[in-house]
Amino acid sequence: MAPADWPDSPAPARADWRDTLRAATDLALLGIVTALASAAVLTAGAALATASGAIHRWTVDGHWPGMRDLAGRFWRGLVPGAVATVVAVVGTLLLGGNVVLISAGVVPGGTVMLVGTGLLAALVAGFAGTVVVEVGRAGGGWRAAVRRTWRLVEQRPLAILAAAGVVGLAAVLTVLTMPILAPILLGYTLFALHAVLRRLAPQ
């Protein structure tokens, strides 16, 4: 049978440009709201967990949670999120302080130690980004998310490396772009983390 005689098959569905624009706008708005909700610093954990959960639901069933659901999750996550935020801030300060001391020559090691610290910081950032995704994907709190992420490190180390790449790229873009665009970039970064881990480490 010649190709001209083949029965017509349905053409693959194409995403409408309006849907793409709507998705981009939604992610930008989510990033801005998350950044505003994180302004008090100790609320950052709850804001990130809420945003991650919203992105997970959107990527699974195509719908965003309602405002009541979002507000409820944010409120319930304030205390555990504050603890997670403190841990993250302390870890960041320790790594940043180590880099400053090595650069100033106070701590021996020079370039080797500086590069090693940078690689460690990238891995920690990838781990932290994966934890945020796990909080949104499965819930259960930050401790449960850390345990799931640790198992993921053992089973699929490539997923953590990919997450580190996403966070690193986001950091570079934040430095290169205007600071006012950083909140918008936050929404896209969270979505990229979910997309990467959904492909490399599906639930």
Image: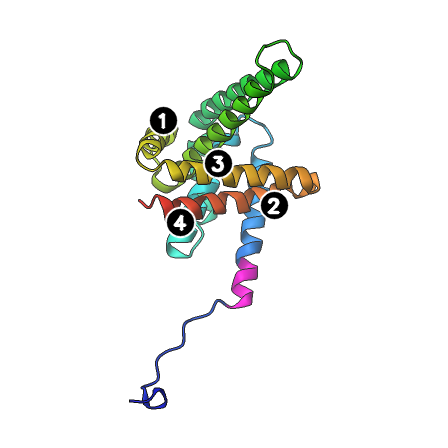
41 lies above or below 190? above
- Neighbours of disc 2 within 10 Å: few (<14), some (14-19), many (20+): many
Percent of width and height locating residue 40: 59, 28
Please name whichever residue, 51 or 194, is drawn nearer the observer in this view of the structure: 194
Residue 158 seen by the camera: yes
Mark closest to the chain's N terminus, 3 or 1: 1
Residue 71 seen by the camera: no
Kind of residue sitting beneath label 1:
Arg
Inter-mark Cα distance, 3 to 2: 19 Å
Inter-mark Cα distance, 1 to 4: 21 Å
Kind of residue sitting beneath label 2:
Ile
Element on which disc 4 rests = helix
**What's drawn in magenta, residue-wise?**
16-22
| Front disc: 3 or 1 | 3
Residue drawn 54% across and 53% down? 26
Element on which disc 2 rests = helix
In the picture, the disc for residue 2 is none
Kind of residue sitting beneath label 3:
Ala
Percent of width and height locating residue 81: 46, 28
Prevailing secondary structure of the magenta residues? helix
Q: Which residue is mark 4?
A: 57
Q: Which residue is mark 3?
A: 164
Q: Which residue is mark 1?
A: 143
